């Protein structure tokens, strides 16, 4: 049995959690005003909270811990869109064989749908979420310049995560005598380049979150956990402000990773 995780999205949102077999289950109720009383494990999720359009769908299970910014951006998007999901918090490192049975790549996130289909890769999962809620509620524009801009920002943010992550794996996981400092510096330079490009963008304080903001804010938290020297407070004021705004929201508070849990070979 694993430790149970719970998160509160807001004072008005109800949250309940139940342990089911080997997965830790986190059921997060929508933080929006229209709430349904859905019994845990009933197989129902709210995908649209407006009375006219409220629809009920079977459950999804998000696989992966929130210290992965790829998992976190999916979790935040699920919450923003009003989905209730179960959370499988097994570790991609400690539970590697089990994770490989979910995703042959042995990576997170995965999203298991009610019919057993497993979506892998955060971009594919977010695409499914957007298609499920429809273009009016999707967290990215369907076409045009705004979509292209969002995709560029997302590519920079996910690229920064990948490069900071590659450097972190080298620094933390590899035995010290097998580390390659030049490679680590190359990865860090690439991450820093993407961060600078993102910092030069105008980040408006919009009322509605989108994938570019969510992914970039998740990137900021991840980089600050793994390699804080890449993003000292004050160096990138626009990203500091974006991250502060996002981390203050219930969807982010409920998925906040306090530590980076990779095996360490110090
Ligand atoms: N492109 C993938 C990247 C996923 C990814 O890199 N996940 C990391 C955690 S942040 C992982 O599973 N790492 C374990 C490994 O690759 O062995 C996505 O967007 O989902």
Image: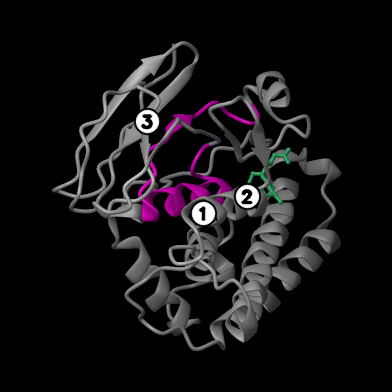
Which residue is the site of mark 3?
44
| Secondary element type, mark 1 | helix
Quarter holding residue 249: bottom left
Q: Say the numbered circle drawn on residue 122.
A: 2
Structural crowding at the residue carrying mark 2, measured as other residues with C-alpha within 10 Å and reported as few (<14), some (14–19) or many (≥20): many
Structural crowding at the residue carrying mark 3, measured as other residues with C-alpha within 10 Å and reported as few (<14), some (14–19) or many (≥20): many
Query: Which is nearer the N-term, disc 2 or disc 1?
Result: 1
| Secondary element type, mark 2 | helix
> Is 172 left or right of 227, judged from the image as shown?
right
Which residue: 52% across, 65% down?
211
- Disc 3 from disc 2: Cα separation: 22 Å
Residue 266 can be seen, yes or no: no
**Mark 3 residue CB less than 8 A from any atom of ligand 1:** no
Q: Is 160 within the magenta?
A: no
**Mark 2 residue CB less than 8 A from any atom of ligand 1:** yes
Residue 106 can be seen, yes or no: yes
Quadrant housing the C terminus: top right
- For residue 228, above or below residue 235: above
Which residue is the site of mark 1?
73
The x and y percentages for residue 242 are 41, 74
Of the four image quadrants, the one with ligand 1 is top right
Structural crowding at the residue carrying mark 1, measured as other residues with C-alpha within 10 Å and reported as few (<14), some (14–19) or many (≥20): many
**Decide: marks 2, 1 in contact (CB < 8 A)?**
yes
């Amino acid at each position: 049995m694993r430790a149970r995780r719970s998160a509160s999205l807001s004072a008005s949102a109800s949250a309940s959690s139940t342990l089911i077999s080997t997965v830790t289950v986190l059921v997060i109720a929508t933080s929006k005003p229209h709430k349904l009383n859905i019994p845990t494990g009933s197989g129902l999720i709210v995908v649209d909270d407006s009375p006219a359009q409220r629809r009920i769908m079977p459950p999804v299970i998000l696989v992966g811990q929130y210290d992965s910014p790829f998992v976190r951006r999916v979790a935040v998007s699920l919450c923003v869109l009003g989905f209730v999901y179960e959370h499988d918090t097994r570790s991609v490192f400690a539970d590697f064989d089990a994770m490989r049975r979910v995703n042959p790549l042995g990576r997170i996130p995965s999203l298991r749908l009610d019919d057993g289909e497993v979506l892998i890769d955060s971009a594919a999962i977010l695409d499914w979420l957007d298609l499920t809620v429809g273009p009016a509620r999707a967290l990215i524009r369907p076409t045009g310049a705004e979509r292209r801009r969002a995709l560029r920002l997302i590519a920079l943010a996910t690229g920064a995560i990948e490069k900071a992550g590659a450097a972190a794996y080298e620094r933390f996981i590899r035995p010290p005598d097998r580390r390659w400092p030049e490679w680590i510096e190359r990865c860090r330079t690439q991450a820093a380049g993407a961060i600078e490009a993102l910092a030069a963008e105008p980040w408006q304080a919009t009322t509605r979150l989108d994938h570019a903001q969510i992914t970039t804010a998740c990137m900021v938290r991840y980089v600050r956990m793994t390699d804080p020297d890449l993003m000292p407070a004050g160096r990138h004021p626009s990203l500091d402000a974006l991250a502060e705004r996002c981390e203050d929201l219930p969807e982010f508070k409920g998925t906040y990773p306090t530590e980076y849990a990779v095996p360490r070979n110090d």
